[in-house]
Amino acid sequence: MQITLVRLGEKNRGCELSVDRFPIRIGRHPQLDVSLNEHCVSEFHCQLEQMNGILFVRDLGSAHGTFVNGFHVVRSDLLPGDQLTVGQVTFQVFYPRMRSACYDDMEREMTLAPIRPRHTADRGCRRVLSTSCRPSIGRTG
């Protein structure tokens, strides 16, 4: 299954990442599948997984959270058109709907993160710094 993540927001708007191998690890570490050079993105932030034609995201204990359509999640499905926010970086998710997956009748699977008070250090993460964007991501072998 091939997915495309399209960057939203002011910086690097429209930048597309095409991914076709799973799991996909996203974070600040330079050797991850999707490396984002942002101070609000944890070194190992989240992971994308695919099961039966449906995409899922799992937070890897990030400091500033993983969000799906504005909901702070620990784990969630990602349907075509959903918005995935990693720290302060937002992507819109696109992938072809699989025949075997019935999106219209399915209930969303989402594990929300517990509510925790914001720390003063979180305030600095409302600014977006710089991001490196590679045109396509995929592992060989």
Image: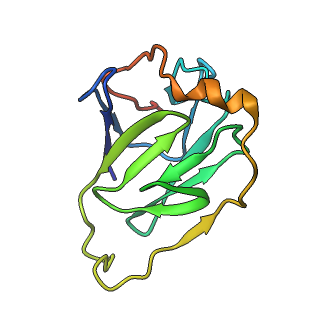
Q: Decide: is 81 above or below 19.
A: below
**How many tags in the picture?**
0
| Nearer to me, 126 or 9 | 126
| Nearer to me, 119 or 79 | 119
Query: At which x and y percent is residue 55?
Result: 43, 59
Q: Is residue 87 left or right of residue 21?
A: right
Query: At which x and y percent is residue 2?
Result: 31, 47
Location of residue 97 (image quadrant) = bottom left
Q: Is residue 3 left or right of residue 71?
A: left
User: Residue at position x 52%, y 73% from top?
Assistant: 109
Q: Decide: is 87 above or below 125.
A: below
| Nearer to me, 17 or 12 | 12
Query: At which x and y percent is residue 31?
Result: 60, 21
Q: Is residue 98 left or right of residue 22?
A: left
User: Residue at position x 71%, y 37% from top?
Assistant: 63
User: Residue at position x 39%, y 29% from top?
Assistant: 137
Query: At which x and y percent is residue 106?
Result: 38, 82
Location of residue 104 (image quadrant) = bottom left
User: Residue at position x 72%, y 43% from top?
Assistant: 118
Q: What scheme was used to colour the molecule?
A: rainbow
